[in-house]
Image: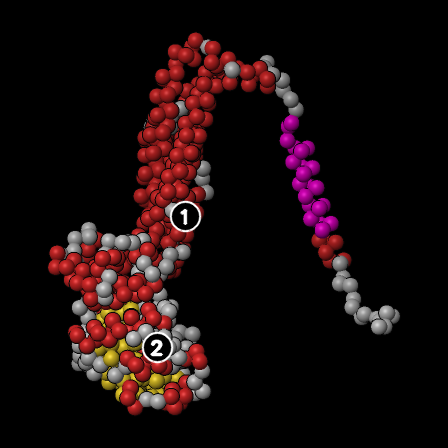
Amino acid sequence: MIEFKNVSLTYPNGHQGLKNVNLKLNDGEFIVVVGLSGAGKSTLIRSINQLVKPTEGELIIDGENTLNFKEKQLRQLRTKIGMIFQNYNLVKRTSVLKNVLSGRLGHTGTIRSLLGLYPQEDVKLALESLDRVGIVEKAYIRADQLSGGQQQRVSIARALTQKPKVILADEPVASLDPPTSHIVMKDLKKINREDNITTLVNLHFIDMAMEYADRIIGMRAGEVVFDGPASSVTEKTFEEIYGRKIKEDDVLGGDEK
Amino acid sequence: MNLDKQYNIQRPDRTKYWMKFGFITFILATLYTIAFTTTDLSYSGSSLSAFDMFKRLFFDTFFDPVVHERIPQYIGYMFETLAIAFAGTMIGAILAIPIGFLAAKNMSGHFSSIGKGILNGIRAFPEILFAVIFVASVGMGPYAGVLAIGINSIGMLGKLYSEVIESIDMTVVEALKASGASRLQAMWFGVIPQVIPEFSSYAIYRFEIDVRASTVLGIVGAGGIGAPIILASNQRAWEQVGMMLIIIIVVVTIIDYLSAYIRKKIV
């Protein structure tokens, strides 16, 4: 369980990313965070694995306040949290398999990993992860040869290879076309269900949020302004979160099912 | 339409511009005058006309029996020159990596100015000066040449490497750190694959430069083809000098061509 207790985050330039956030994220939930750009969605997600560090409050993961963690504990924590980025963040010039294997780096000794000596079961795990997102046949192809949707699935496989308890996805579909976006979201949802991985996804498309989420968290100006099950959400709720009328741009559409 | 309309726009004042222009012209003219009046440009006479010189260097050289006899020896010297350049570039290309990382702002933050300082210091001298220093400290011969070329290559390669590192996509490093990788792992897997092609391309380019630089090292006794060239020219044996120059031209041209070809394949 992840618990935010009065968490605030002020950036060095004085901008307030998070304002007094209180949240409890239960194990296995599929949570979608919505809000306009600049509302603090990314900051919220990134503070869980401390890519940005909250300046106040407590962030409790499995009973421990992670904000007091030292370098080593933090790395330990991060091995259990998979992350997916808008721009995939793959090493483009190496093979898909090597990219997926890099999810094991935190579990592999430094010397061993620098020599590229991953244990056999890690390689097997990496191939399994690729299989689960349906692109195992691309394992030995260079990452930059793949399409955007395929690259994003590689990055999901990389996260899976970590055997994470939590997956954070920061705008995972913002660079993809509608059909591909749905494939990626379905993969995330499937993994969430099968492995009971707590999943947090940033989105700004409201129809997608309603379709995939168990729970929706709405943010505006660094504050949590809505938190509730996806079933209780209507367009009206989004208008409240966004503080304006819903526009065409807020809807993705295009699910081919 | 009213053609008599008055526009109330003032021409900008150009006096300042012309004053600056006049001042700079004056300074340049003064420097020019000083340079010419204090430099001795008088022609001191030569036993050889430029035409004769050229003829002996690049034509007579093909018909001189002494030259014919010594061609294998010259080729041997050229090989030594290439070997010096290769060993020097190798040392430089490898040692430049840690200094390049140190000098890259996105890797070492504030410490990068230390790395940049080292590199600037190295690049302040030409390799011939390093050669003089190394000949004095490790003795005559190619060893001094290799060290001179190596150290000098670090200066340029380190700077180019650090620029390559500064231009990489740091999001990959962020992703690796987010998955619990250590700093060293994140660098090895996130940075190295991105920079290796550019690094090798620059190292090959530097080899080209080092081959040319190695040809003059012999002048100060640091090995290679420079020594016989200076010897022959002291004896006014221009036919021999000519053959060595021709060998250098041919080899350098081949290497430039190969290097361009390989570099195109890499990047």
SS at badge 2: loop
Q: Is residue B14 above or below residue A179?
A: above
Q: Residue at x 40, y 24 (%)?
A: B225
Q: Residue furthest right?
A: B4
- Residue name at image x 34 percent, y 26 percent: B80
- Residue B211, x across and y down, in percent: 40, 32
Does A253 sit left or right of A184 as displayed? right
Q: Is residue B173 visible?
A: no
- The overriding secondary structure of the stretch rendered in magenta is helix
Near-viewer residue (B74 or B111): B74
Crowd rating for badge 2 (residues with CA inside 10 Å; few <14, some 14–19, many 20+)? many
Residue A203: numbered disc: 2
Residue B52 location (% of width, % of height): 57, 15
Q: Which mark is residue B160?
A: 1
Query: Chain letter of disc 2?
Result: A
- Identify which residue, A1 or B237, lies in the foreground: A1
Kind of element beneath mark 1:
helix
Q: Residue at x 29, y 75 (%)?
A: A257
The residue at the point 19 percent across, 77 percent down is: A193
Q: Amino acid at mark 1?
A: Leu
- In 3D space, how far apart are the residues under numbered discs 1 and 2 (Cα atoms)? 40 Å
Q: Tell me which chain the residue with mark 1 is part of.
A: B
Q: Residue B244: image x %, image y %?
A: 44, 21
Query: Across the whole image, how many numbered discs are drawn on residues?
Result: 2
Can residue A115 be seen? yes
Stretch in magenta: B21-41
